[in-house]
Structure formats: structure tokens, C-alpha cells
Image (cartoon, grey):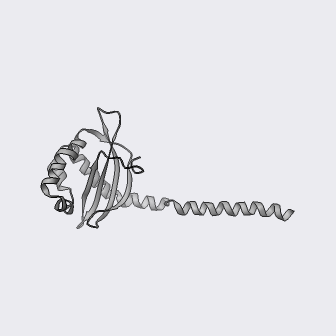
Amino acid sequence: MNRRRILLPLLLAVSLVSGLSEARAATPSVVQDLKMAQDSQPFRAAADEFVARSMAGDVAATQSMLSRSLVERTGDEAVKRALQTQIVPFFQRGREPGKSVTITRTTDASGQQGFAFYMWMEYAEAPTARPFTVYVVREQGRLVVANIVPDRLVEGRHR
């Protein structure tokens, strides 16, 4: 009888420790999160610069930050039209980027790697922020914007 009383708590303890190990394996480690935050800093600076240039209404400056691969796939005129009619106006209406940012790794259509920044734009005239995403990759040693998606919510990314 004594042996059974000792064995039951011991089995429960082993079960709890095993469950903790499984939970740790299922979630990214703090070390990995910190490394990604550190690795993404220069990419984030490029994303912030793109947003600032867009908010200032500088189409030529924003276009100069775009991936050559993106521009070649899409065409200069189509890119310029998208910047003038969709992207720059979205940012110009904004007061400031929100504080919440989700960062993920990304790879563009040409296989270039970088980071995606899921962010929010605060507006003076609107009570709610609007979502946007900026994808920044390293292209031939230069950090460039590989894609911009204004005003689209990505569930689980925009928080």
C-alpha cells in the first residue's frame, strides 16, 4: 500500500515534466525570438524608411527602394501607378505607424530572403488603425522592399 502511494505522485511528476518538455518543443525559444529580432533590425530600418518616404509622398524615393526583381516582373509603369494610386496615398493619410509589429522570415519570388513586418497605420481622422505589410529582402547585397500590402489584415500576424 505504501509503495502505491509513492508511485502515484511519482508518475504524476514524470507526466508533468514530460508535458512541459513537449510544450517547450512546440513553442519557439526565447533565444530564437531574440536572434530574429536582432537579425531583422537592419531590415526593419529599411521598412521604416520606406514608410517615412511614402508618408512624405515621395514616389520617386519609394520607387528607388523597391526590388529590381519586383520592378522587372511587374513593369515600371505598373509599379509607378500602384505607388501613386494605392501605396503612397495609404501612407500619406496616416498620422504615424502603430507600435504593434509582428516579424516573420520571408522569401520573395526570386528566392531572396528577408523579413516581413506586419504593422498598423494610425489615422488622425479614423478611430481605428489600418493594417499593412512591408516585405524587405537582401537583393545583391542591398536591402530592398520586395512587396507592400496596404490595408489588408493577415489573421494571426496583425496583432
Foreground: 25 or 49? Answer: 25
Q: How far across and how far down the image is residue 60, in percent?
A: 14, 51
> Which quadrant of the structure image shows residue 143?
bottom left
Q: How far across and how far down the image is residue 52, in percent?
A: 24, 46
At x 74%, y 63%, the residue is: 10
Q: In the image, is 72 to the left or to the right of 149?
A: left
Vertical relation: 156 (above or below) 6: above
> Which quadrant of the structure image shows residue 98?
top left
Q: Residue furthest left?
A: 77
At x 82%, y 60%, the residue is: 5
Q: How far across and how far down the image is residue 87, in percent?
A: 22, 47
> Which quadrant of the structure image shows residue 116?
bottom left
Q: In the image, is 149 to the left or to the right of 25?
A: left
Which quadrant holds the N terminus? bottom right
Q: How far across and how far down the image is residue 122, in percent?
A: 32, 39
Q: In the image, is 56 to the left or to the right of 11?
A: left
Q: Residue furthest right?
A: 1
Q: In the image, is 128 to the left or to the right of 77?
A: right
Vertical relation: 147 (above or below) 150: below
Vertical relation: 38 (above or below) 90: below
Foreground: 15 or 153? Answer: 153
- What is the number of callouts on the image? 0
At x 39%, y 46%, the residue is: 100
Foreground: 137 or 45? Answer: 137
At x 34%, y 61%, the residue is: 106
